[in-house]
């Protein structure tokens, strides 16, 4: 079968000493930065981008993927040990994980998280290997109307599935798209919104935006918020779960994996929604739901498996269609573009060794994470005890050097400062910046496909509804929006996200 | 979202949209069949204004009991972090990486967090050396290193 020869190709790429080393370094640095309180995967990847700049594309991609799941994993560690989830997808892990830690079972919680994530990672890798090629073959049938409809659906789904006001999030997407359109228009070569600033003639750099909104703005928020400073953390004693633990955790991990693999592929899906869904599923299935929130091991195993599976499955639409399902994947696209790789339907057929090498390295990376994290837990604990006064200048230096080294110009550093202030204000007025980032990447793509569609139809908007595939996608989008307008569902959505506050 | 947040974000979206309409006033709009470069930006800008109006409308209709959190700005970290980043950008070309890094690390003293001077100085020197070794030596990034 094709799959095996493809995977064999992947192993031959990923198992070279050099690439294993890149994978290891990526996972290590990803965890190291991801463990720091208040820094999510997005900021971690943005900060560590410069260390991949000088690598060749395969090595760089493998390292980036390593950084990504390292950061995911680091976030869970912080959530369990100090109840400070670095990102929203490990919020649910903190609910029961931190309680386990307080009962002296921090080691067990960490090991459960690691093993559940590893299991989920293995399954998700296979899911990617099967689903991505199928999806990219399907994408070859897509014309401009279908791509437009698909991207609009992705944007709307991302907004609905995220927390916060839906109206404001739609607004953030549009602001992101507007910012994404700044610079020289690809089709006509004319300039838009450049205000005579030479440095943005090629558009605003995505890394500058992401680093400002997530790196710098998060540091400001953490300094303002006393939670960013508490560092009372738990002692680690026993690591390995016992028989009873395994019996409770294993089925939860399996259910979480399935849920994550499914939800991760959906536009707007990914780690966040998967972990929330898994937590409520486990709570519903449990014999005694009142144990949840008091250190139930299923409440760690399920969501951890789900968020890892979801995070990896969200690579599928990114790699196969070139459409990022969430903000982290948008950053991955930007990072790949720096290395001259354009993800999309042609990526797989044009560069099979790169694609399959990356897939297999994800599996290796997950294994490295388990090997790396269980013995190194003690170091992460120490890292969490460093006072924020010493920590934040170091993080800031990483952000500054990272942004500076994209184009070697100080303009980008100043622009990052500006986006940092912008991001902080957005958060204060209740607008989450994640949809903005997604809109920023998708803006120019949507415009191009939209323009082509209407050129095809000679300005007739009904083309979106007369082609069956695009009509289905538009229908699904409208249905999604209507569902959210129903009062009962809206209440359910608010409740699902309440645990986050 | 609290009521005050809805007011402020509503005004923000309207202002942003209006600014985008103004900034794109000279761009060709064209027709749907032959879009000019101003077509999508104008549509998005109007979209922003609509979103802003909806948020304002929601803010007006909420009962007083559901007012939600009030917006507060932590000026000290906001100003300090912005200053640190701009200082990095401004000083780097003249002082080089290690000295710039050490200086902005020392600026952290003004953060209001608990710290001790000896430890902060150790941090500053350590970060300066580390950034030099990591970014310049190991990763070979073309960053100015010394002031001369």
Image (cartoon, rainbow, N blue to C red):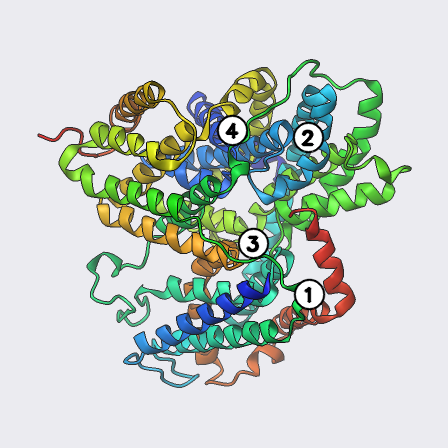
Q: Which circle's residue, 4 or 3, is located before the other in the chain? A: 4
| Numbered tag placed on residue B65 in the rendering | 1
Where disc 4 sits, the SS reads: helix
Q: Chain of mark 4?
A: A
Between A473 and A141, the one lying in front of the other is A473
Residue sitting at 57 percent across and 34 percent down? A75
Q: CA distance from mark 4 to mark 3?
A: 23 Å
From the viewer's perspective, tell me whether residue A297 is left or right of residue A71: right
What residue is pinned by disc 4? A31
**Residue B118 visible in image:** yes
How many neighbours does mark 1 have within 10 angstroms: few (below 14), some (14-19), or many (20 or more)? Answer: few
Between A96 and A224, the one lying in front of the other is A224
Q: Which circle's residue, 2 or 4, is located before the other in the chain? A: 4
| Numbered tag placed on residue A352 in the rendering | none
Depth check, mark 4 against mark 1: the one in front is 1
The image shows residue A393 at horizontal and vertical percentages of: 36, 33
Where disc 3 sits, the SS reads: loop
How many neighbours does mark 2 have within 10 angstroms: few (below 14), some (14-19), or many (20 or more)? Answer: many
| Numbered tag placed on residue A98 in the rendering | 2
Q: Chain of mark 3?
A: A
């Amino acid at each position: 079968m094709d799959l095996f020869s493809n995977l064999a190709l992947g192993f031959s790429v990923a198992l070279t000493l050099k690439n294993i080393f890149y994978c290891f370094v990526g996972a290590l640095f990803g965890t190291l930065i991801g463990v720091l309180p208040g820094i999510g995967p997005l900021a971690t990847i943005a900060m560590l981008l410069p260390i991949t700049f000088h690598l060749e594309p395969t090595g760089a991609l493998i390292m980036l993927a390593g950084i990504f799941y390292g950061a995911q994993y680091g976030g869970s560690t912080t959530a369990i040990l100090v109840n400070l989830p670095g990102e929203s997808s490990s919020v649910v892990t903190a609910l029961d994980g931190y309680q386990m830690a307080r009962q002296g079972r921090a080691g067990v919680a960490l090991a459960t998280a690691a093993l559940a994530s590893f299991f989920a990672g293995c399954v998700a890798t296979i899911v990617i290997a099967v689903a991505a090629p199928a999806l990219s073959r399907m994408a070859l049938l897509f014309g401009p109307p279908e791509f437009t409809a698909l991207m609009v659906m992705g944007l709307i789904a991302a907004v609905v599935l995220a927390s916060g006001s839906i109206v404001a999030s739609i607004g953030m997407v549009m602001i992101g798209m507007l910012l994404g359109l700044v610079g020289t228009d690809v089709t006509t070569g004319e300039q838009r919104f450049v205000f005579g600033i030479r440095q943005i003639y090629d558009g605003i750099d995505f890394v500058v935006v992401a680093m400002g909104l997530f790196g710098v703005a998060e540091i400001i928020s953490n300094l303002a918020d006393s939670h960013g400073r508490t560092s009372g953390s738990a002692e680690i004693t026993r690591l390995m779960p016992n028989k009873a633990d395994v019996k409770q955790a294993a089925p939860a991990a399996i259910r979480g994996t399935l849920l994550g693999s499914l939800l991760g592929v959906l536009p707007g899906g990914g780690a966040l929604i998967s972990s929330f869904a898994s937590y409520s599923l486990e709570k519903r299935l449990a014999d005694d739901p009142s144990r949840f929130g008091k250190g139930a091991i299923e409440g760690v195993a399920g969501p951890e498996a789900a968020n890892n599976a979801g995070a990896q499955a969200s690579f599928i639409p990114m790699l196969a269609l070139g459409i990022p399902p969430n903000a982290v994947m948008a950053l991955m696209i930007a990072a790949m573009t720096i290395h001259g790789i354009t993800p999309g339907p042609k990526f797989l057929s044009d560069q099979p060794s790169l694609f399959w090498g990356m897939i297999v390295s994800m599996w290796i990376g997950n294994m490295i994470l388990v090997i790396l994290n269980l013995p190194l837990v003690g170091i992460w604990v120490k890292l969490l005890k460093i006072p924020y006064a010493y920590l934040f200048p170091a993080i800031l230096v990483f952000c500054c050097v990272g942004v500076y080294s994209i184009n070697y110009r100080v303009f980008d550093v100043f622009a990052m400062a500006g986006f940092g202030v912008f991001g902080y204000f957005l958060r204060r007025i209740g607008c989450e910046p994640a949809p903005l980032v997604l809109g920023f990447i998708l803006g120019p793509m949507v415009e191009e496909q939209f323009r082509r569609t209407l050129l095809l139809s000679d300005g007739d908007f009904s083309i979106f509804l007369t082609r069956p595939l695009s009509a289905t996608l538009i229908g699904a989008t409208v249905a999604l929006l209507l569902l959210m307008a129903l009062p009962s569902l809206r209440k359910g959505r608010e409740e699902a996200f309440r645990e986050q506050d | 979202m609290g009521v005050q947040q809805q007011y402020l974000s509503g005004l923000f979206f309207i202002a942003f949209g209006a600014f985008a309409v103004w900034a794109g006033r000279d761009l060709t709009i064209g027709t749907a069949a032959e879009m000019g470069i101003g077509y999508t930006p104008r549509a998005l800008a109007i979209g922003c204004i609509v979103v802003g109006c909806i948020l304002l409308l929601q803010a007006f209709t909420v009962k007083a009991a559901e007012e939600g959190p009030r917006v507060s700005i932590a000026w000290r970290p906001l100003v300090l972090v912005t200053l640190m980043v701009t200082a990095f950008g401004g000083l780097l070309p003249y002082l080089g990486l290690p000295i710039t890094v050490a200086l902005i690390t020392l600026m952290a003293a003004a953060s209001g967090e608990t710290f001790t001077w000896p430890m902060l100085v150790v941090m500053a020197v350590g970060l300066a050396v580390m950034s030099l070794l990591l970014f310049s030596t190991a990763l070979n990034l073309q960053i100015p290193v010394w002031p001369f």
